[in-house]
Image: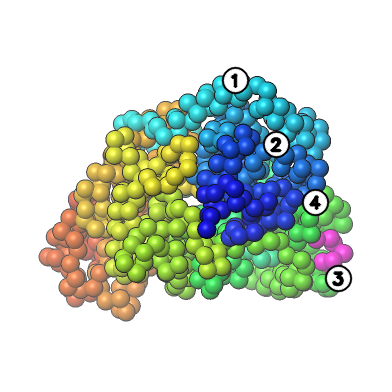
Amino acid sequence: MTDPMTDPDSLAANALGAETSPYLLQHKDNPVHWQPWSDAAFAAAKRDNRPVLLSIGYSACHWCHVMAHESFEDDGIAAAMNRDFVNIKVDREERPDVDQIYQHALALLGEQGGWPLTMFLTAEREPFWGGTYFPPEDRWGRPGFPRVLDRIAAIYRDEGDKVRANAETLKSALAGLGVNQPGGPVARQTFLQIADFLLSRMDHAHGGLAGAPKFPQCGLFDLIWRAWAETGNPQYRNAVLLVLDRMSQGGIYDHLGGGYARYSTDTFWLAPHFEKMLYDNAQILELLAHAWAGTGADLYRIRADETVAWLTREMLIDGRAFASALDADSEGEEGKFYVWSQDEIEGLLGGDAAAFCEAYDVSADGNWEGKVILNRSQRPMLGDADHEAMLERCRAVLLEARAARPRPGLDDKVLADWNGYTIHALALAGAILDRPEWIGLAAGAFDFVLDEMTLDKESGGNRLLHSWREGRAAHPATAEDYASLIRAALTLFEATGEARYLAQARRWTEAIDRHFLDAADGGYFLAADDVSGLLVRAKSVHDNATPSSNGLMVHNLVRLGLLAGDTDMLGRADALVKAFSGELNRNALAAPLLTSGARLLETALQTVVVGPADAAETQALVRAAWQAPAPARVFRRIDPGDALPDGHPAHGPVERRGLADGRPAAYVCQGMTCSLPMTDPAALTERLTQPLRGRSPA
């Protein structure tokens, strides 16, 4: 029996029907003879001496839909594609290792990256030309896709030397993807210089980085927040609060259903690109929790509550894990599900309509393409309890009415790394905001990954798969899967005290070390050592829409080392920082997680609460520890009589003192120096915020 994944003679005309990706399944009925990424597809290209047309996108991508409708559903264009190319379709969310290589190839060609990505390859997987979206005819200064197809086919057929030269040049340059830029330690001065540089690039009227479009670049905002926690400089704090305020009251936030859209197309956070991504909302939830701890402001608590309610109501899969994304489009139109007219709102809200319209920027002319995007940018201040209760009732009426509309598509695949971000955020926010049910949600998703996305689980295996959908787990896990889930396990351990999470973090750290670590030059490759079919193994510390695995692993190694009392882990975190810190000389904004991880290594506030879990005094100390604005906190609670690891700085003090006069007590350590035991929650909060007065070391 032949295997269609390896046998080029058994390729189906369109082979996407057997895939799990919602994005690939969107293309299963195209007249294009799409193939999934496989050895067989490239073998067919070699056998037939045809170039490969590689198209990469994702299910919630608006311009991917546009190009599909205009070109991939067109019989004439499809005929040209089938005649001259082997056509391969890739979901960039399922294969980020593939996407990263060819996005970088496009950048080397001098083009701006994005999706849909359209690349032309040799049968050896080498890129030689490419672009992103192409219209069906010449338009907007871009060549029409049929003309592109004819030209590339002719060049490949008649100018093989040119194809080979381009391919060799790009292949040589792509080898740099596996090379890191080493350097020295990241000192406090460097950290603050980067924070100051970020401040200089911020939009101090509307929040976020200046200009448009505006993205929720949470890694950068988190670095600025940590600079405030370390220095007490209010400029840092205010910059983060401003962007959270504008996002949370702007049109990028779904004021009816909760959750944040991918980005704003303007400088005001008004008009979003309407897709909702799991990874954005996880990172924003974490930032909201930190902001609430630093301010106690109702807005951040409310938006966190509403975002988790949206995750629970619309994104929960199999009652446990979380779906990837909601589409921007419905009924073939971007944003149609979310926008309103004044007449619709007045008809639904009756006597409350005038007050609602004033609060939410509703007018007859609309505020976006003749329609209304609900937002509170013009009326951002929350009103009194009665006013807000009235607005809440109005929102519930509109949400119910909106539910009857045709819904945007749900990409219901479960991704290990994106669920890792969400588990971490839920556990952290649940601990800070005292929402134990959120920690329960996080634990359920964590167990889903263990149960459904682990290879050889029955024999104790710790290898992960990247994607799951409808009972099928598939695709090799990346370093980002491991790094995000290690962080999630550590946060769940801090939030619950359950030893199994710390043990699992250790096991996954062993797995990422065994299969991803570059023992010669340091750092973690994105793809494992046993993943085949990649032109190069990429290795990066750049944080993009999601955190880099190497930046995350600095934080993970520090936290794991501190929680487990393992000084070897701390040395490895330092080495990982140095393996990439030279990159900061080229691009100060490239690696905020690496930068903040380097500071965590120097300034971590190891906080231990000793006391019975069910004692009110213990719970008060635990709440004080979590609710202090201390992003460098590394926390654990232990029962009286339990021992800390020998390498933990509080091991000796806790062993000698334990409870304070029989009462639950807290200890805070920086480096190897620990405080006296504290029984007063206010004193603990004060101690954890001392770095705000510039008392942090280094």
Depth-wise, is mark 3 or mark 2 nearer the camera? 2
Q: Mark 2 points at which residue?
A: 84
3D distance between C-alphas at marks 3 and 4: 19 Å
Depth-wise, is mark 3 or mark 1 nearer the camera? 1
* Residue drawn 78% across the image and 55% down it: 332
Label 4 element class: loop
**Is residue 599 in view?**
no
Q: Crowding at label 4, few (<14), some or many (≥20) Cα neighbours within 10 Å? A: some
Q: Name the residue under label 3.
A: 347
Is 354 left, or right, of 65 in this rendering? Answer: right
Type of amino acid at the residue the image marks with label 4: Asn
Type of amino acid at the residue the image marks with label 2: Asp
Instruction: Give the extent of the magenta segment.
Output: 339-346
Is 237 left, or right, of 675 in this rendering? Answer: right
Q: Are marks 2 and 1 in contact (CB under 8 Å)?
A: no
Q: Which is more N-terminal, label 2 or label 3?
A: 2
* Residue drawn 19% across the image and 71% down it: 642
3D distance between C-alphas at marks 4 and 2: 46 Å
Label 1 element class: helix
Query: Looking at the rendering, in which quadrant would you find the C terminus?
Result: top left
Q: Is residue 444 above or below residue 583?
A: below
Q: Where is residue 241 in the image (x, y as percent from the top left)?
A: 54, 50
Residue farthest left in this picture:
656
3D distance between C-alphas at marks 3 and 1: 67 Å
**Is residue 85 in view?**
yes
Q: Mark 4 points at which residue?
A: 367
Q: Please name whichever residue, 70 or 266, is drawn nearer the observer in this view of the structure.
A: 70
Q: Where is residue 217 in the image (x, y as percent from the top left)?
A: 54, 45
Is 571 left, or right, of 167 in this rendering? Answer: left
Q: Mark 1 points at which residue?
A: 161
Q: Which is more N-terminal, label 4 or label 1?
A: 1
